[in-house]
Image: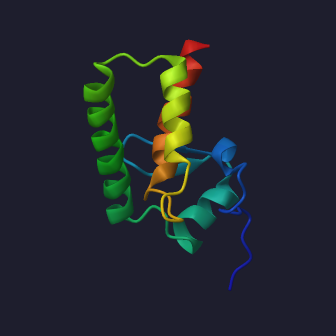
């Protein structure tokens, strides 16, 4: 019942947050970070572990799939595939994968 300073449904959220290596969601704005931690409870230990595990699994499978090389085109295609709902559903913890792909694409630019 608390008003939020962060809207998790806003597509621009991806520019406000980042993911730490331990799977936690981090925001530089203290009020938004409080909402992530205390109101939305998005940094509970099991959620952080799940995000980290999903990302690790994704990187391993993509490394095998691409033989360790990712082109910008391949990354863009994979991102589009992941963001296309299957039976109306998107993969769990998709945000951490999207952030990883976009960060990797940014290194190439």
| Left or right of 51 in this view: 84 | right
Q: Residue at x 47, y 46 (%)?
A: 96
Q: Which image quadrant: the N terminus?
A: bottom right
Q: Which of these two is toward me, 65 or 25?
A: 65
Query: Furthest residue to the front?
Result: 87
Q: Looking at the picture, how far across and down is residue 41, in whole percent?
A: 50, 70
The relative height of residue 12 versus residue 32 in the rendered view (above or below) is above
| Left or right of 98 in this view: 47 | left
The mark tally for this picture is 0
Query: Residue 49's image quarter?
Result: bottom left
Q: Which image quadrant: the C terminus?
A: top right
The relative height of residue 88 versus residue 80 in the rendered view (above or below) is below
Q: Which of these two is toward me, 48 or 96?
A: 96
Query: Furthest residue to the bottom?
Result: 1
Q: Residue at x 54, y 19 (%)?
A: 72
Q: Looking at the picture, how far across and down is residue 61, in whole percent?
A: 28, 35
Q: Looking at the picture, how far across and down is residue 35, in whole percent?
A: 62, 66
How was this image coloured? rainbow
Q: Which of these two is toward me, 7 or 29?
A: 7
Query: Residue 67's image quarter?
Result: top left
Q: Looking at the picture, how far across and down is residue 7, in whole percent?
A: 71, 63
| Left or right of 51 in this view: 26 | right
The relative height of residue 88 versus residue 105 in the rendered view (above or below) is below
Q: Residue at x 50, y 63 (%)?
A: 89
The relative height of residue 101 versus residue 26 in the rendered view (above or below) is above
């Amino acid at each position: 019942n608390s008003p939020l300073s962060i809207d998790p449904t806003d597509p621009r959220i991806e520019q406000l947050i980042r993911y730490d290596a331990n799977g936690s969601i981090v925001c530089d704005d203290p009020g938004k970070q409080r909402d992530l931690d205390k109101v939305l409870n998005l940094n509970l230990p099991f959620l952080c572990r799940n995000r980290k595990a999903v990302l690790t699994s994704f990187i391993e499978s993509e490394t095998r799939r691409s033989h360790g090389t990712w082109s910008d085109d391949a990354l863009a295609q994979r991102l589009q595939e992941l963001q296309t709902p299957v039976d109306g559903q998107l993969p769990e913890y998709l945000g951490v994968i999207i952030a990883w792909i976009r960060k990797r694409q940014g290194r190439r630019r």
